[in-house]
Amino acid sequence: MPVNTAVYQSIKKELSLTNTRLIAVSKTKPLGDLQEMYDLGQRDFGENYVQELVDKQAALPKDINWHFIGHLQSNKVKYIAPFVHLIHGVDGLKLLQEINKQAAKNNRVIDCLLQIHIAQEETKFGLNEKELTELQPYIDQLKNVRICGLMGMASFTEDQLQLESEFKSLKSIAEKFKSIFGSISTVHRLPSMILSMGMSSDYQLAIQNGSNMVRIGSLLFGARK
Ligand SMILES: *Cc1c(COP(=O)(O)O)cnc(C)c1O
């Protein structure tokens, strides 16, 4: 299925009004689809699986910003550390320490977002406020990671009020923990505090509630199998 050019253009235009960054979520999609999106001007792509990301990075243009948005296992950090642009789903000290170690090996500072659990479902990953508080003192010691903001996934629901309250909670946690975010972000064109929230079905509501980075897949590339 080809990329939906008209939808892409209209989303880009819509997002430009609020200076919101678009991450095109290309997991499971073939290289041709990503190249097509690249040719339209898209440079930020999001992937969930390490092996798939590594293969795509090797095959596609080198100026793509690769975002890892899935659940990252510590033993796989080394494969993406040389090139990853932003890791969205960091939810523990052990993972953060491993990212720091692999970043140092590659002589770089890796930008990360801490994932916060905002949904009602038990299954979604992420930290709660208490865990975030406990993590706080360690963050300064990790010289090769920079925490640029927070990421959250809302509940799988059509209840707009529920979604809204979850987005608002992420925004308010971000405000509360502002001091942990590194001041110089290499993620250009963005404020120093990134709030990555909103997907195909709820990105407009997410932006209304403070998102400045949305992760959109199926609207752009068509439904996944
Ligand atoms: C798959 C995925 C998305 C994109 O979902 P769509 O509904 O296709 O827009 C966004 N964020 C995360 C973390 C994902 O895994």
Image (spheres, rainbow, N blue to C red):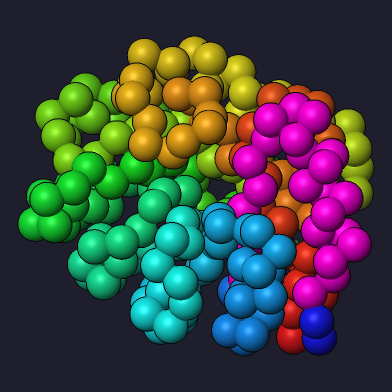
Residue 56 is at least partly visible in this image: yes
Determine the image quadrant of residue 66: bottom left
Residue 155 is at least partly visible in this image: no
Residue in the foreground of this view, choosing between 159 and 37: 37
Residue in the foreground of this view, choosing between 55 and 180: 55
Q: Residue at x 43, y 83 (%)?
A: 59
Say whether residue 219 is left or right of residue 30.
right
Q: Residue furthest left?
A: 105
Say whether residue 155 is left or right of residue 205.
left
Q: Residue at x 62, y 67 (%)?
A: 38
Q: Which residues are the magenta region?
A: 3-26
Q: Residue at x 73, y 52 (%)?
A: 199
Q: Check residue 16 for magenta coloring.
A: yes
Q: Residue at x 38, y 31 (%)?
A: 185
Residue 35, percent across and down?
A: 61, 76
Q: Check residue 184 for magenta coloring.
A: no
Determine the image quadrant of residue 30: bottom right
From what the image shows, is residue 111 above or below residue 42? above
From what the image shows, is residue 217 above or below residue 210? below
Q: How many marks?
A: 0
From what the image shows, is residue 51 above or below residue 5? below
Residue 50, percent across and down?
A: 39, 74
Say whether residue 143 is left or right of residue 58.
left
Residue 117, percent across and down?
A: 56, 41
Residue 79, percent across and down?
A: 26, 72
